[in-house]
Amino acid sequence: MRSRRRRSNGADYLNDAIALLGGWTRDGVQLRRDLPCDDSQHAALTERIKVAADTLAIRPSIRRVDGHTQICLGSSDGVAITDGEVTLAARIEDFYRTVVQRS
């Protein structure tokens, strides 16, 4: 695992990246997001996430609850959020915009 890079001002670059991801919340060592979508949008979104997650060797938790797709990135065993998980979160935002606009 790569060490976290720091800017010259000492700010953690992952915290900066997470701050730019609108709608994602940091829950300890996990990133979470709820996205409103219908069943067909959920299916399309889930397929896109699976392909990207496989490429990054990440196993997101994806659930369908009350008309929303709930996504959780990161392990629950106390390992810090990785740059791959932040990258996947950004990709998910792009996927979501694409899927919702097509419907």
Image (spheres, rainbow, N blue to C red):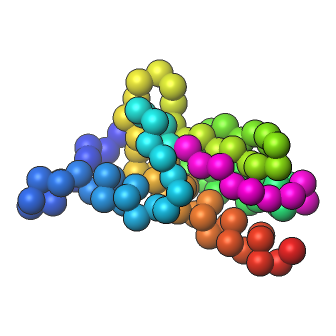
Which of the two residues, 46 or 32, is positioned nearer the viewer here? 32
Outermost residue toward the bottom in this view = 101
93 horizontally vs 15: left or right: right
The residue sitting at 31% across, 52% down in the picture is 15
Question: Residue 65: x and y, percent?
Answer: 79, 40
At horizontal 84% and vertical 61% (from top left) the residue drawn is 41
Q: Residue at x 18, y 54 (%)?
A: 11
Pick out the residue farthest to the top.
Answer: 77
Please provide percent x and percent y for residue 7. Answer: 15, 60
In the rendered view, does 2 fall on the left or right side of 57? left
**Residue 6 percent coordinates (x, y):** 18, 54
Residue 64: which quarter of the image?
top right
Q: Residue at x 37, y 35 (%)?
A: 80
Magenta-highlighted residues: 32-40
Q: Position of residue 59 (x, y in %)?
A: 62, 39
Q: Quadrant of the N terminus?
A: top left
Near-viewer residue (51 or 61): 61
Residue 101, compared with residue 78, is above or below; it is: below
Q: For residue 96: magenta?
A: no
Q: Residue furthest front?
A: 66
Judge whether residue 57 can be spotted in this image.
no
Identify whether 17 is placed above or below 65: below
